[in-house]
Amino acid sequence: MSRFRRNPQQPHRTRPSRRALRDQQMLADALRDTALALNSTLDLDEVIDRILSHLAHIIPYDTADVLLIEGDTFRIMRSKGNRERGTEDWLHNLRIPLEAFGNLMLMLRTRRPLLIPDTHQAQEWKDFPFTEWIRSNLGAPIHIEEQPIGFITLNSAKPGSFTPEHAAHLEIFASHAAIALRNAQLYSQMEQRVRERTAELQFERNRLQVLLDATGEGIIYTEGLRIQYVNPALCHMTGYTADELIGRSVAIFRRTDSPPEEVKRLIAIREALRRDELWRDEFRLRAKDGREFDAGLTISLIGAPDERLLRAVTVMRDISQEKELYAQKARFVAHASHELRTPLTNLLTRLYLLRRKPEYLDEHLAVLEEVSGRMRLLVEDLLDLSRFERGTIVLRPEVLSVQDLLASVVNVQQHEAARKQIGITLSLPDRPLTVYADRERLIQVVTNLVTNAIHYTPVGGQVCVSAFAEVCDGGGCVGLSVEDTGIGIEAKHLPHLFQPFYRVTTGKEGTGLGLTIAKEIVDLHGGIIEVESAPGKGSRFTVRLPLMRVRESMATRE
Ligand code: ADP
C-alpha cells in the first residue's frame, strides 16, 4: 500500500518530462542571453544575430529571417542559413512587396504568430523561386508600441517541423527583437540629434569665430587676471601674438611707469565687476614694442560676481587717433578764435579812436578796411576748410594746359614780386602738359605757393615756377613746383606745415590756413604735395597730379 493517498479532489499534476525540462531550461538560458545581449550592446545586427542563433537551439530551422517593413514592402534585415543555400546575396537588400506574401499579410491582420505545417497544403503560401524548397514555415510579427514593424520567419525543408509551442516561443523572441529594434531606433534618433546639435554648435562656433576675427576691436577673455583668449584685432593693436598672450597676466599691457592712481583705478574695476556692473574707462597701455597708446576699455563680467576667479570679457579700442583728433579740433577752435579776436580788437580800437578823433577818419578808414578785409579772408578760408572736412566741395574738372595755368598765375603775381624786387621765372617743358583738374582750385593752390614764396623771400631773391612730367607710383604724373631762395624752414616744422593754423614765422601776416587748403585740394584731385626746405637755403613745394587719371578722364569724355 502506498504510504501516500492522493486526494481525489486535488488536480492531477503530471511531472514534466526530462525533455520538457531541458527545453524549458534552454528557453530560459536563451532568453537570458538575449536579454544580456540587449543590455550589453547597441549593435542591432549583433543582437538580432544572437536572437537567431538562440532560436536555432529552441526551434530547429533551416533558415531564419528578420524582415523589416518599409511602407508597402519589406526587406530582409538579417538572416541565418541563406548563405548555405546560396540565396543570401540574392536576397540582400531586396525590397519585396508585402502583398505578394499571404502569410505575412495574414500576420499583419491577426498580429499573431502563424504556423504553416505544410506549405503545399496552405492557401496563404505561394511559392517563389527562392522559397520553393520550404515545406514548413513559422512566423511571428514584431511590434513596437502596437505598430507592426517586421517579422521573424523560420523555414524548414521538412513539413511539420514547427509546433504551436514553437510558435509561442517565437513570439517571445519577436518581442525581444522588438526591444532591440526600438533601442536601435532610439539610438539612431539620439545619434541624429547629437549630430544635428554638434553641427549647430560647430556652426555657432564658426560664426562666433568669424565675428571675433573680423571685429576691428580687440577682445580679451580673462579668468582672474589671466588671459585665456585674444582675437586678431587685439594682437594687431598690441603687437603680441596670441601665443605670447595666452596664459599671461593682463599686467603685460601696463606701462612700466604707470602712475600710482592707476592701481586705484584697477581696484575700482574689480569692485565694479563684483557689483555685476559694466566697467568703462580709458587707460594708457603699452604695446610689445614699448609704444604707448590710449585704449578705451569696456569690461563685462560673464560669470557670477561671487566666483573666486572673476571671468570677464574686455573690449579694447585704440583711441589714440581719436584723442589726437579731438585735441586737434580743440586747438583749431582755440586758434580760429584767437585769429579772429586779434583783428576784431584792432577794429574796435579804431572805432573807439574814431569816436574820439573823427578828424582822422581817412586814416582810420584805411586800417578798418584792411583789417576787415583780412577778417573776411580768414572767414572764407575757415569756411573753405570746413567744406573740405564735410566733403561738400564739388570739383569741376576740365582738361587744362599746365603751361597756360602757371603762366597766368605768374603773370598776376609779377607785380607783387617786382614790388619786392624778387625775380620770378617760369621753367616749362616744350612738350604740352595737360591735367584734368578744377581750374579755379588749381589756380588757388599755385597762387598760394607763389605768394608764400614771394612772402617768405627777402628782397632781391628769386622764385622759379616749373612743370615737368615723370613716372611715379607705377604710372605717369605731372609735377608743378614753386622754388624760392627765401628764408627756408627748419626740418622740425616740415611735418606740421600742412596742419591748420601752423605757422613758423608768426611775425608775418597770414592765416596759417593756405597750405592746409592747398593740401585738401591736391588730395581731392588724387595728388600729393611735398616740401623740401632748409633754413637760409630756400624752399621747394612740389605738387604731383596723376597722369593716368588725366588720360582716363579724357578717354571717358571723348
Ligand atoms: P600763412 O598764411 O601763414 O602763409 P600757410 O599755410 O600758407 O599760412 O603757410 C604756413 C607756414 O608755412 C607759414 O606761416 C610759413 O611759416 C611757412 N611757409 C610757407 N611757405 C613758405 C616758404 N615758401 N618759405 C618759408 N616758409 C614758408
Image (cartoon, grey):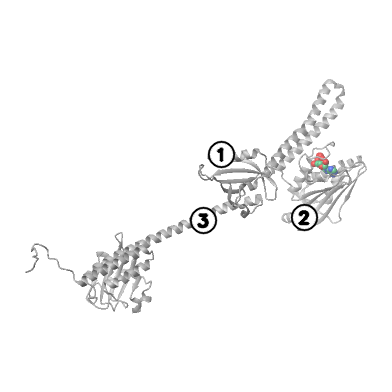
C-alpha span from label 2 to label 3: 50 Å
Q: Amino acid at mark 2?
A: Leu
**Splitting the image into 4 quarters, where does residue 373 fall?**
top right
Q: Residue 272, image x and y in percent?
A: 56, 39
Give the secondary structure at mark 3.
Answer: helix
Q: Residue furthest top?
A: 356
Give the secondary structure at mark 1.
Answer: helix
The local crowd at label 1, few if under 14, some if 14 to 19, many if 20 or more residues have their Cα within 10 Å, is some
Q: Residue 428, image x and y in percent?
A: 86, 52
Residue 149 seen in render: no
Ligand 1 picture quarter: top right
Q: Are marks 1 and 2 in contact (CB under 8 Å)?
A: no
Check residue 547 in the rendering and tell me which mark sits there, or answer none: 2
C-alpha span from label 1 to label 2: 59 Å
Q: Residue 410, image x and y in percent?
A: 86, 45
Q: Confirm if mark 1 falls within 8 A of ligand 1.
A: no
Q: Residue 516, image x and y in percent?
A: 77, 43
**Splitting the image into 4 quarters, where does residue 59 fall?**
bottom left
Height in image: 281 above or below 100?
Answer: above
Q: Is residue 368 left or right of 106 when viewed as pictured? A: right
Image quadrant in which the N terminus is located: bottom left
Which residue is disc 3 drawn over? 203
Give 475 or 152, whichever is nearer the viewer. Answer: 152
Height in image: 200 above or below 490?
Answer: below
C-alpha span from label 1 to label 3: 34 Å
Q: Nearer the viewer, mark 2 or mark 3?
A: 3
Which residue is disc 1 drawn over? 272
Q: Is residue 512 left or right of 69 when viewed as pictured? A: right
Choose the circle earlier in sequence order: 1 or 3.
3
Residue 364 seen in render: yes
Q: Amino acid at mark 3?
A: Phe
Q: Amino acid at mark 1?
A: Ala
